[in-house]
Amino acid sequence: MMLGAIEAGGTKFVLAAGTSPDVITARQTIPTRDPATTLAQAAAWFAGQGQFTAIGIGSFGPIELDRRSSRWGFITNTPKPGWADCDIAGYFRARLGVPVGFDTDVNAAALAEYAAAQGEGCSSLAYLTIGTGIGGGLVLGGKPVHGAAHPEMGHIYPRRHPLDRDFAGVCPHHGDCLEGLASGPAIMTRWGASLSEFPQEHPSHAIIADYIAQACHTLFAAVAAERIVIGGGVAKTGGLVERIRARTAELGANYLPGSACHHIRTPHHGDNAGIIGAMTLANAALSSQAL
Ligand code: ZN
């Protein structure tokens, strides 16, 4: 059996091949250009790896996940030039002639982290990425959550921090949503540097931690998640996850039931959570129990 995986991002595609989600034997990274160029380059790499059994794709979004829709497997109304209405799953199904598993990049990462947490009996896990954008995936009882499309946790509205009343936010749709206030571009626009460039006493650290902590509190309160895994470039800032953990506990105020089971972690798989999750999607595409 050979599984293929794609972590389709806005700036790069990570490609992988392996015999199971835990065993990646080859990988490649290519820049994200226009769809025709990028998808052809990815397909050519897979063709050079041998015969595949299934492919899994964890993609940037928004994407269509409704299996009753003729547009299942499409990247839909993304503002990324050229990529709107791109039938990414159909492309690889046609080119490689294999079943395709498909979900958001963050649901894929959540699946990988969920699998890693099984030894500890975790049955509900959210994955948040804090980077160029903010996105979140959610796995409950082993399945990634799909409802009306997929979660868009980056676009919830946090309460404004008292020291951050005036910044309008950078989200082109909402202004001061979570992504508009706490993503890498929001930090750069507001303070002219990335978070890791500021000393720990600079207010930026507490402000960003507060916004992410509000998202964590919301996840604990709204879906009773047991574990939140925080990845992405901004999350690598020294001390940030510890601040988020402490601030989330403050916001919870010892009220939420089960709060002793609430855990905020960095990714078990580090930067590989997304591609390992895409391998999991490939594996699931082979079984009748589609995710
Ligand atoms: Zn937004």
Image: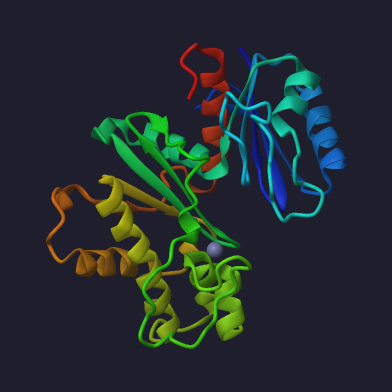
Most foreground residue, 46 or 141: 141
Asked whether residue 147 appears in the rendered view, the answer is: yes
Asked whether residue 3 appears in the rendered view, the answer is: no
Q: How many marks?
A: 0
Colour scheme of the rendered structure:
rainbow
**Is 249 positioned to the left or the right of 29 in the image?**
left
Question: Does 161 sit above or below residue 250?
Answer: below
Residue drawn at (77%, 48%) of the image: 32
Most foreground residue, 253 or 228: 253
State the image coordinates of residue 91 (x, y, percent, origin top left): 77, 27
State the image coordinates of residue 54 (x, y, percent, origin top left): 64, 18
State the image coordinates of residue 11 (x, y, percent, origin top left): 72, 53
**Is 270 positioned to the left or the right of 93 in the image?**
left
Image quarter in which the N terminus is found? top right
Residue drawn at (85%, 33%) of the image: 40
Residue drawn at (57%, 60%) of the image: 133
**Is 24 positioned to the left or the right of 85 in the image?**
left
Question: Does 148 sit above or below residue 197?
Answer: above
- The image quadrant that residue 93 belongs to is top right
**In which of the image's four quarters is ligand 1 placed?**
bottom right
State the image coordinates of residue 102 (x, y, percent, origin top left): 59, 30
Most foreground residue, 160 or 147: 147
Residue drawn at (78%, 34%) of the image: 42
